Amino acid sequence: MYKRQAFDLKGKVALITGGAHGIGFSIAQGMAACGAVICFNCSSQSSLEKGLAAYKEAGIDAHGYVADVSDEQAVQAMVAKIKAEVGPVDILVNNAGLMKRVPMLEMSHADFMRVIDVHVGGAFNCSKAVLPDMIEKRAGKIINICSMMSELGRETVSAYAAAKGALKMLTKNIASEYGEYNIQCNGMGPGYIATAQTAPLRETQPDGSRHPFDQFILAKTPAGRWGEAEDMVGPAVFLASNASDFVNGQILYADGGILAYLGRQPK
């Protein structure tokens, strides 16, 4: 018989990279509500302080750490500190990332590789740091925040699409390599989410009309709306819990149906 306790995260230590705001913060809130102990990572002290204030306001006793996820030594030191202060990581959410919207011909190789290094190198570094304890316990959950750009391309996001496509395959490989230790590595692919990062794309135009990209997304999404960060909580809790113990190497797309939809037929 199926039990509700399958979604219980009580006592589990969850590390959410880039967890001070947006999707990462919402996922952390959801996991905390299910009993997890929350650790989050930021790339700067100022972001850390804002994150700690946000968690405090939400009533969550979170543990914050500063580290550049693309720096392997910094990540190893951070995970060692978390283990000493809180406990070994049971759940890792590789959420840290950055976006550079630049046409490919105008993007430098250095900028391209920086996007790759944060999204893919960061997930590699963080996963590598937590896997030894997961192997020892023969239990662990790794959730990589992928994207619809793991499957699609679009103008000005060559680096981001390349990074998210690579992250999808890293997800599958971690599942393949460490599944025998009862470690599940899956991905989540958010659709277009209403966050501070996408706010400029949703601004009302001077004539009162919707931003052209806003109109485009609403027309392409069967749900007829942008996603909210809170829409990512349920899928993340599922992938972090015992309910997903036989799910491995998969990407769960929470996109309102965009990837399933060819588009509306012209009238």
Image (spheres, rainbow, N blue to C red):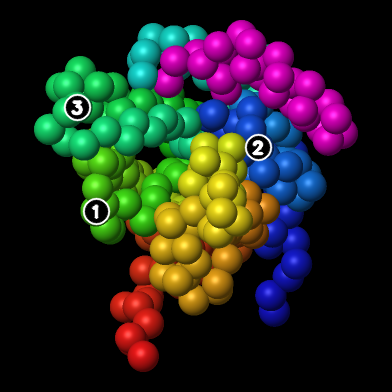
* Front-most of residues 267 and 87: 267
Q: Point out residue 136 in the picture as x, y percentages from the top left corner.
A: 48, 33
> How far apart are labels 2 and 3 at the CA level?
30 Å
Residue on which the image places disc 1: 153
Say which element carries label 3: loop
> How far apart are labels 1 and 3 at the CA level?
16 Å
**Does residue 111 appear in this view?**
yes
Label of residue 185 in the image: none
Q: Residue at x 19, y 27 (%)?
A: 107
Q: Residue at x 53, y 29 (%)?
A: 17
Which quarter of the figure is the N terminus placed in?
bottom right
Mark 1 or 3, closer to the camera:
3
Q: Earlier in the sequence, mark 1 or mark 3?
A: 3
Residue on which the image places disc 2: 25
Give the left or right position of residue 22, taking residue 264 as reference.
right
Where is residue 99, by image quadrant? top left
Say which element carries label 2: helix
Q: Earlier in the sequence, mark 2 or mark 3?
A: 2
Span colored in magenta: 41-69
Residue on which the image places disc 3: 107
Q: Is residue 227 magenta?
A: no
Q: Are marks 1 and 3 in contact (CB under 8 Å)?
A: no
- Callout 2, which amino acid? Phe
Q: Point out residue 203 in the picture as x, y percentages from the top left corner.
A: 57, 47
Say which element carries label 1: loop
In the displayed structure, would residue 171 be above or below residue 231? above
Mark 1 or 2, closer to the camera:
1
